[in-house]
Amino acid sequence: MHALKTTFARLRPAVDFCALRIVETRGETLSVRQDVQEPLTRMVDRGAMVTVIHQGGYGYAATSLLTEAGLRAAVDEAKRWADISRTRSVFDYSLVQLPQPSGTYRSPHVASAPTWQRAELLELLMAESRAAKLDPRIVDWGATIALLETRQLYISHAAAVNGEPGVEQEWRFVMPGASVTAFADGDTQTRSLGGQYNGYCQQGGLEIVQASGLLGAGRRVAEEALELLTAPNCPTGTLDLLLLPEQMLLQLHESIGHPLELDRILGDERNYAGTSFVTPEMFGSYRYGSDLLNVAYDPTIPQEFASYGWDDDGSPAQKHLLIENGILRRPLGGAISQARAGLPGVANARACSWNRAPIDRMANLNIEPGDATLAELIASVDRGVLMDTNVSWSIDDSRNKFQFGCERGVLIEGGKLAGVVKNPNYRGISATFWRSLKRVGNASTAHTMGTPFCGKGEPNQIIRVGHASPACLFANIDVFGGET
């Protein structure tokens, strides 16, 4: 990467602004399914993206040919697209002042080699797999651990010419998971660790495996899957709803994260993934939730899945409250979207790889903890349902009306847990659902989670996001179960 900085400096593109982003990613996945080791998967991916702003036009081009000729061709192609867009764009990109930063960011423990002993890890996965097959009704089961390491350099051409270091960032991601499916009498129930989105993903080392609860998960999730087979269906009615962090991950992601992405608000996603019920005029005054709702964009938490020092347009990462005491304050918009909308945003222009341009992504989106223990939350409910771990979801094109299903529910009656129920579902409207928030759990109820599977953009980009949330209690929610 240091040699490429020197090569980039020699190119001398005749443009107003030019930047280079080099990304190298290495990954490996170990998995066991039904007590059989699946084929080891490994990947290496590297390349570069060049961004050009010139005379009001904006262009970019990617290359995997990391030579002077390859970079020169990418610069020329990016300039060509900037020239084309100058006469056709609805926005004058000369109004954007992209930063020219220098600095470093590293995940926890990334400076040391990972203790990635394949034989030991496979035996761990095999032990969890064997523990899960505790009953003939268990029909599918498995466990997995994935490791991903990424190095990235971002530097403007002016900084490269001046001998400045640019921004160098290194990440190490660990992604554990486990799932068990049980079947009997025509009914199928699945219980998992973190849900279908691998929710216990974090930055760091193999200490994440211990923290995630993977050790011992095989038997636990199998027992819970079997318990669901014989449980009654979730009742239908207007009830209080207590959501644990594994479900709050998706609730926060879909009904706050995506609606607040500024490029979506500006219409960029309309033809592909829909728009947003949020409009630019709402910021500063709109009541998104109750006074208890405080939502932060925070890429500064070292272990959270989407933490970083600078975004992919070079903006420095800082914590900002997007919703403060229920009032909508700030969108999820990077430097370019901020200039287009005339609104303050955050450093969240991110790309999934070297061959994609940065777009507005939610990164770490967290609910600030409240003051209640889990026991206090349960005790405050006269009649309700506790739900955990997403299993299905549906939300409309404006990210407003939604319907979510969970793997597991527990009835709450008279302030006490009153038995497991299966097929728990609830529905609501983003614009009003969060106003029903009546109590927020404290830090003891919170988990720092994430998922590698957030999709957005044309061409599509699958990217990592982080979500930390305490347990949250909502009043008078439309709850329903499966067929009786």
Image (spheres, rainbow, N blue to C red):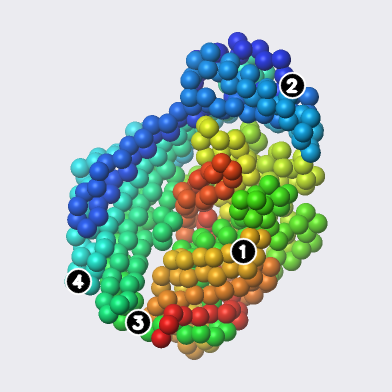
Quadrant housing residue 380? bottom right
Residue 373 showing in the rendered view: no
Q: Nearer the viewer, mark 1 or mark 3?
A: 1
85, above or below 261, in the image:
above
Give the mark, 1 or 3, whose residue is nearer the N terminus.
3
Residue highlighted by disc 4? 135
Residue highlighted by disc 3? 231
Give the mark, 3 or 2, whose residue is nearer the N terminus.
2
Q: Circle 1 sits in a helix, a strand or a loop, which is it? A: loop
Nearer the observer, 293 or 334: 334
Residue 330 showing in the rendered view: yes
Quadrant housing residue 219? bottom left
Q: Nearer the viewer, mark 1 or mark 2?
A: 1
Give the numbered dot on residue 16: 2
Give the numbered dot on residue 421: none
Q: Residue at x 61, y 73 (%)?
A: 428
18, above or below 449, in the image:
above
Give the mark, 4 or 3, whose residue is nearer the N terminus.
4
| Residue 135 image offset from top left, x and y in percent | 19, 71
Q: CA distance from mark 3 to mark 2?
A: 65 Å
Q: Circle 4 sits in a helix, a strand or a loop, which is it? A: loop
Left or right of 22 in this view: 53: right
Q: Looking at the picture, which amino acid does disc 1 mark?
A: Asp
Q: Residue at x 20, y 42 (%)?
A: 119
Residues tagged 3 and 2 counted as in contact (Cβ below 8 A)? no
Q: Looking at the picture, which amino acid does disc 4 mark?
A: Asp
Q: Circle 3 sits in a helix, a strand or a loop, which is it? A: loop
